[in-house]
Image (tube, rainbow, N blue to C red):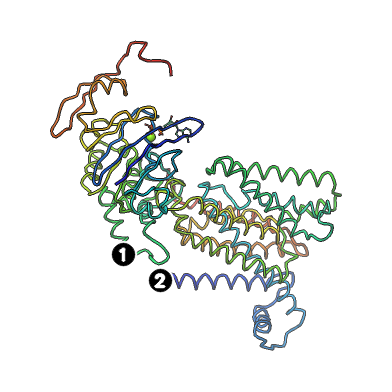
């Protein structure tokens, strides 16, 4: 059993490393894998290979950082989606359900268009603050509305609608066409601005967040028959709700503040993972994380290469290629009533 | 073993239960009967400690349930809800394995012992052959038997059952009640079939509109008069061995108009 787990873990690491290497090699200019390897060796332990400094710079400063952030983001969003779907017992739950992406966009436009913070706030920080404010409001509303799954979902819808409307209001009232297009682009998700400092934020957040969720795998299993059944199985439901909703909200808010709200991953990857390994969270969460990471790196590669000379928003790619792939998985699922 | 003291519970601006005092002794089978909406399910969730009462206490061996950690409660008390469904595609065996949750932890991983307990629980409800079937493919009665198996896998001292015979055919209804009575367990079960209560319960508690109206041995409680007053049915009651009885239902009773105020 433990051997199988170790083997599975090793295999997962290999797949992830391969995806990261592809992410670093493929782009507008194709850089051979051995150059990628040598760049990493130079940078990580000063191996001192002689390389074209431009190639080395592109690989290290842009592509590796970008692939790492894509992986962190994909893993975090997929795990958040899986956790929320289980806690809310709703197959349609995704990381943005609790108002986070709507709040982030309001925060971002407040900074970018209204000039909130007087130049001291970055777009990212504005988005993060907006996301957390919106989540706080949704959480408060859910508490008042009775804490049940339906109450939480409805509170999330109300919060999301409110902040979406606020964003539209600000954009239509104050933005010029150029700004509006920029915001639109940002909202669909965008990895082009990603550099190493973003890795320093995204990677630890994704790692810690996913580990916190995986540490609660057994408790998440116990929610299969609802919160009452979980309580009867010895789960402290309130505490669990605070930890899980808090952790997923923080992870999602930070990812959104770095790359915008990339859709689809958090909704669909968990279902793909369930189709592969079943519903037990010990397997479901790590597999969701891996699939999410690899899928996001692949989507990023596609977004950079599919139209030569143009980078498409990654959110467009995730849905454009993810939806058909998911349809295939759905159709192969054994039919039950 | 488990005692309720002056329990009151309110929900939706109404008092659902008021002033209920009740106790179940070690290894006793206590049946709770009453019309729809009389508060049986509400009382059972309070007894299982899932909600704090508005007033009063539930005492487990003398300690207030609200003062005991959830996990420690779940090692002693198992609950089978009246309705518990899932949209997850877990297998029958995985559903039963959930029963081991309160016994597991970071320092106490899943073991062979747990596998044996789960196998035994599946076997005791005759579901061994269904172990790998996905939940959505199971019939209502099969699901109900798995819920019971999950509660048994929890290895509790007290088993709280909310209409456990729901969806079961006659054989499995009697089989289930015999099974839980044969175990050395304290059983508290809400039952609709009064003959089941009469056959299996050591004592019966009767709820009506949130109040406890009577408790006692089956033959003392299930009288034609009580059946007419609480359940509005005409019945003949035939005495049976050791304080038990058999009920023959004759039809819905038609009380004089003044006895039936508009509700
Ligand atoms: N959360 C709630 N909010 C408002 N009313 C409630 C709530 N829970 C239960 N009730 C009401 O309390 C009363 C008792 O409900 P309960 O489910 O305990 O009845 P019961 O005796 O189990 O009925 P049944 O035989 O139909 O299962 C019902 O009238 C029900 O509508
Ligand atoms: Mg009930």
- The answer to whether residue A172 shows anywhere in this view is yes
Query: Which label belongs to residue B112?
Result: 1
Give whichever of A74, A19 is nearer the camera.
Answer: A74
* Residue B50: quadrant of the picture: top left
Q: Position of residue A313 (x, y in %)?
A: 72, 58
Image mark 2: chain: A
Q: Residues within 10 Å of mark 1 (few under 14, many from 20)?
A: few
- Residue lying at 26% horizontally and 30% vertically, measured from the top left: B194
Q: Position of residue A221 (x, y in %)?
A: 45, 54
Give whichever of B52, A171 is nearer the camera.
Answer: B52
Q: Quadrant of the C terminus of chain A?
A: top left
Residue under disc 1 on the same chain as residue under disc 2 = no
Q: Quadrant of ligand 2?
A: top left
Is disc 2's CB within 8 Å of ligand 2? Answer: no
Q: Quadrant of the N terminus of chain A?
A: bottom left
Callout in the foreground (1, 2) = 1
Q: Position of residue A155 (x, y in %)?
A: 61, 42
Q: Under tag 1, what secondary structure?
A: helix
Q: Which residue is mark 2?
A: A2
Give whichever of A56, A256 is nearer the camera.
Answer: A256
* Residue A198: quadrant of the picture: bottom right
Q: Under tag 2, what secondary structure?
A: helix
Q: Measured along the vertical axis of the image, is residue B75 above or below residue B38?
A: below
* Residue B139: quadrant of the picture: top left
Q: Position of residue A244 (x, y in %)?
A: 54, 55
Q: Residues within 10 Å of mark 2 (few under 14, many from 20)?
A: few
Q: Measured along the vertical axis of the image, is residue B104 above or below residue B240?
A: below
- Residue lying at 25% horizontally and 20% vertically, measured from the top left: B225
């Amino acid at each position: 059993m433990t051997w199988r787990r170790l083997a599975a873990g090793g295999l997962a690491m290999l797949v992830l490393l391969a995806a990261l290497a592809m992410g670093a090699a493929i782009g507008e200019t194709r850089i051979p894998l051995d150059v990628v390897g040598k760049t990493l060796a130079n940078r990580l332990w000063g191996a001192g290979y002689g390389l074209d400094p431009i190639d080395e710079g592109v690989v290290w400063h842009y592509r590796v950082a970008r692939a790492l952030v894509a992986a962190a983001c994909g893993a975090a969003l997929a795990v958040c989606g899986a956790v929320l779907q289980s806690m809310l017992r709703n197959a349609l739950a995704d990381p943005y359900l609790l108002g986070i992406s709507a709040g982030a966009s309001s925060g971002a436009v407040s900074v970018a268009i209204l000039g909130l913070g007087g130049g001291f706030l970055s777009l990212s920080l504005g988005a993060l603050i907006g996301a957390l404010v919106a989540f706080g409001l949704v959480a408060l509303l859910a508490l008042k509305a009775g804490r049940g799954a339906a109450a939480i979902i409805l509170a999330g819808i109300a919060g999301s609608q409110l902040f979406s409307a606020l964003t539209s209001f600000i954009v239509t009232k104050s933005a010029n066409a150029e700004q509006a297009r920029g915001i639109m682009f940002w909202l669909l998700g965008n990895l082009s601005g990603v550099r190493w400092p973003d890795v320093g934020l995204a990677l630890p957040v994704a790692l810690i967040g996913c580990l916190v969720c995986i540490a609660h795998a057994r408790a998440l299993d116990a929610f299969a028959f609802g919160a009452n059944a979980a309580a009867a199985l010895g789960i402290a439901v309130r505490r669990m709700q605070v930890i899980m909703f808090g952790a997923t909200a923080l992870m999602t808010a930070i990812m959104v503040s770095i790359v915008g709200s990339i859709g689809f991953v958090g909704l669909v990857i968990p279902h793909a993972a369930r189709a592969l390994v079943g519903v037990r969270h010990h397997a479901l969460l790590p597999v969701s994380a891996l699939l999410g990471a690899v899928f996001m790196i692949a989507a990023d590669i596609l977004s950079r290469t599919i139209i030569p000379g143009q980078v498409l928003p990654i959110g467009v790619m995730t849905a454009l290629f993810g939806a058909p792939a998911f349809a295939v998985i759905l159709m192969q699922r054994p039919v039950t009533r | 073993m488990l005692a309720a003291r002056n329990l009151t519970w309110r929900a939706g601006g109404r008092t659902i239960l008021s002033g209920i005092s009740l106790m179940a002794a070690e290894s006793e089978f206590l049946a709770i009967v009453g019309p729809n909406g009389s508060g049986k399910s509400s009382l059972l969730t309070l007894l299982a400690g899932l909600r704090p009462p508005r007033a009063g206490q539930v005492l487990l061996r003398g300690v207030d349930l609200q003062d005991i950690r959830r996990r420690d409660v779940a090692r002693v008390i198992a609950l089978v809800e009246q309705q518990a469904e899932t949209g997850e595609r877990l297998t029958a065996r995985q559903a039963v394995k959930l029963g081991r949750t309160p016994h597991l932890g970071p320092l106490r991983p899943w073991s062979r012992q747990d596998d044996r307990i789960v196998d035994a629980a599946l076997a005791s409800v005759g579901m061994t052959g269904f172990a790998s079937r996905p939940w959505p493919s199971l019939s209502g009665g099969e699901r109900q038997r798995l819920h019971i198996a999950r509660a048994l896998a929890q290895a509790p001292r007290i088993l709280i059952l909310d209409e456990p015979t729901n969806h079961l055919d006659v054989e499995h209804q009697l089989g289930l009640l015999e099974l839980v009575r044969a175990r050395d367990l304290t059983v508290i079960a809400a039952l609709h079939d009064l003959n089941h209560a009469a056959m299996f319960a050591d004592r019966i508690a009767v709820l009506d509109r949130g109040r406890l109206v009577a408790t006692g041995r089956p033959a003392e409680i299930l009288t034609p008069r009580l059946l007419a007053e609480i359940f509005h049915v005409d019945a003949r009651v035939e005495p049976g061995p050791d304080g038990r009885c058999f009920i023959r239902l004759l039809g819905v009773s038609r009380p004089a108009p003044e006895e039936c105020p508009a509700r």
